[in-house]
Amino acid sequence: MSTYTLLVDLPLTVDGYALEGLVREVSSGFTRRSTVIALRGDGHEGRGEDVVYDAEDHEALQAAGAVQPLAGSWTLGDFCAHVDALELFPVAPLRGEVSRLYRRWAFHSAALDLALRQAGRPLHDVLGRPPRPVTFVVSLRLGEPASIEPLARLLRDCPTLRFKLDATPSWDDALLAALVATGAVDSIDFKGLYRGSEVDNPGDAVLYRRVADAFPDAWLEDPDLEAAGTDEALAADRDRITWDAPIHSIADIEALPFAPRMVNVKPSRLGGLERLCAAYDYCAAHGIRAYGGGQFELGVGRGQAQYLASMFHPETPNDLAPSGYNERARGAGLPASPLPPSPSATGFRWGG
């Protein structure tokens, strides 16, 4: 039985919904905004988080208010199909289709939370998948010019932390040696497949080879293998290349230049409950490991991604550190990996 089949017929009553804007300064040096979708029905509330990246898209959504025709009695599957047919943006999103996926996931996840709360059951019970401790890495950019200090500061507070680092051209030999000496690097993100973003990082065959040699056991995420010399530079390391930015569907996994050993199954980027469940099932059927990733969530979205990781890929290098690690002013006392299981008694929530 497919994963989605276990969820599709859950009854769902929706009386209405509300929008809640969130805002916070985060560690990557920008102001993060998100919008919580609070679906209400039958005395319960289900919550999801819209992680569209452009502030203008959140402002337009919140200014328009709760205008979507969502009230009624549904099955969860019918409600999600109804949402998919709606125009959820008052004006066209600045980043196009990927933003539409993020917003659909916000409504789908809120509906899943509400349907489970109305049924009086938690997600893991319905899926028959006990939650397990979630291994996580801290995703980190080391500044420009790059310095080990951001990583060293976190290790002083929590010596057992593991990291996923954004490799940039300013990584010199001294920095590479210092990073290797920590023994704390699990993943390197080349950010080679972003276009028109603040983190674009053009493919660099020399950098790729230097990093791959320095970290022979690390996962290598999102290299640009179409840039000059890069495919050849990493030809011997294909078994540890992983993919994140291009993965929005099963078709995207199938379109990769070679069969992957592991991919990032990011709930918001898959853009819908059926698509997410299908991706989990596809990876399991094809022997592809999965790991989860976050989107600088400020509300329930981070915990929901951790909840999914606890059931589908708890032991991989999940880029799902608790939200406190994204704060610009991080403090001591943040949780260490792995995170103990913390599902809510009912619904699709993590953390009590």
Image (cartoon, helix red, strand yellow):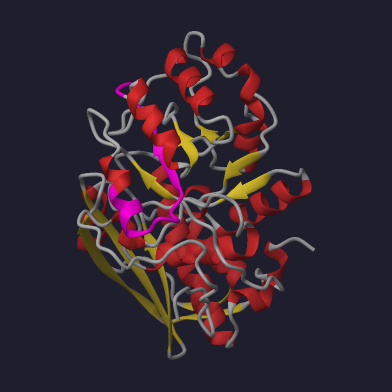
Camera-side residue: 117 or 350? 350
Q: Residue at (43%, 63%) from the top-left corner?
A: 336
Camera-side residue: 125 or 49? 125
Location of residue 140 in the rendering, given as x and y in whole percent from the top left corner: 35, 43
Location of residue 230 in the rendering, given as x and y in whole percent from the top left corner: 51, 14
Q: Is residue 59 above or below residue 310?
A: above
Quadrant (top left/top right/bottom left/bottom right) for the N terminus: bottom right
Q: Residue at (48%, 8%) from the top-left corner?
A: 228
For the magenta stretch, what is the residue range?
Answer: 153-170
Q: Please tell me whether residue 348 belongs to the stretch shown in magenta.
A: no
- Quadrant of the image occupied by residue 125: bottom right
Quadrant (top left/top right/bottom left/bottom right) for the C terminus: bottom left
Location of residue 249 in the rendering, given as x and y in whole percent from the top left corner: 59, 43
Q: Please tell me whether residue 154 belongs to the stretch shown in magenta.
A: yes
Location of residue 84 in the rendering, given as x and y in whole percent from the top left corner: 50, 56
Q: Residue at (35%, 58%) from the top-left corner?
A: 297
Q: How many marks?
A: 0
